[in-house]
Image (spheres, coloured by chain):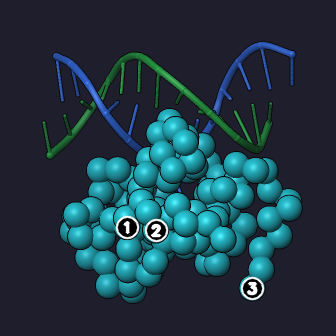
Chain colours: A cyan, B blue, C green
Amino acid sequence: MKIDLDKFSEFEKKVYNIVKKIPEGKVATYGQIAKILGNKYYARAVGNALNKNPYPIIIPCHRVIKSNGEIGGFKKGIHEKIKLLKKENIEIKNNKINLDKYLVNDAVLKINE
DNA sequence: TGTTTGACAAGCA
DNA sequence: CTGCTTGCCAAAC
C-alpha cells in the first residue's frame, strides 16, 4: 500500500521514510531519528510528526521509543504500542526496552531509495 | 503573525 | 533512581 506523501510537509516525509526502514524486532529512538535528519534537537518535532501519523500501521511508529529505553507515547494508546512491540519479540521490562539489544543501527535508517 | 503545544533529550540536584 | 530545568523544533492555534 502506497502513502500519499504529497500531502505532508518535507519534514514529515523524511520522518516517515526513516521510520518505515526500522526492521521488525528492532527499535529506534526519537533522538536517533532526529540526528539522521541532521540535528538531535529535531527529537520533539519527530514525535509531533508521528503523533499526526495518518497510517499508524503502515508506518511502524510503535518501533520508535525514547532515548532512555522507555516506551514513549502512541496515538492509539501506550498499551497498544507495547502489544505491538511484544508481538515482534521485543522484551519489555518495567516498561523499558533494552537498547543494547534492540536498537537498530543508524546506517540501516540512512539508506534511502 | 506571535504563541502554545508536545509520542524528546541531556544535564543537574 | 526520581524530579525539575533548559534547549530546540515543526505544526497547530
Residue depicted at 24% across the width and 70% down the height: A101
Q: Which residue is mark 1?
A: A104
Q: Nearer the viewer, mark 1 or mark 3?
A: 1
Q: Quadrant of the C terminus of chain A?
A: bottom right
**Label 1 CA crowd tier, 10 Å (few <14, some 14–19, many 20+):** many
Residue A26 - label: none
The image position of residue A103, as x and y in percent, is 33, 65
- Chain of the residue displaying label 1: A
Type of amino acid under label 1: Val
Horizontal relation, residue A25 to residue A111: left or right: left
Spatial distance from mark 1 to mark 2, Cα to Cα?
7 Å
Tell me: residue B6, above or below residue A111: above
| Residue marked by disc 2 | A108
Is there any visible trace of residue A19 in the rendered image?
no
Q: Is residue A13 visible?
A: yes
The span from disc 1 to disc 3 (Cα, nearest Å) is 24 Å
Q: Residue A1: give its label.
A: 3
Disc 3 to disc 2, how far (Cα)? 22 Å
- Vertical position of residue A108 compared to residue C13: above or below: below
Q: Residues within 10 Å of mark 2 (few under 14, many from 20)?
A: few
Type of the residue with mark 3: Met
* Other residues around mark 3 within 10 Å, as few (<14) / some (14–19) / many (≥20): few
Query: Residue A92: x percent and y percent?
Result: 27, 71
Query: Disc 2 residue type?
Result: Val
Quadrant in the rendering for residue A56: bottom right
Residue A98, x across and y down, in percent: 23, 65
Residue A80 drawn above or below residue A72: below
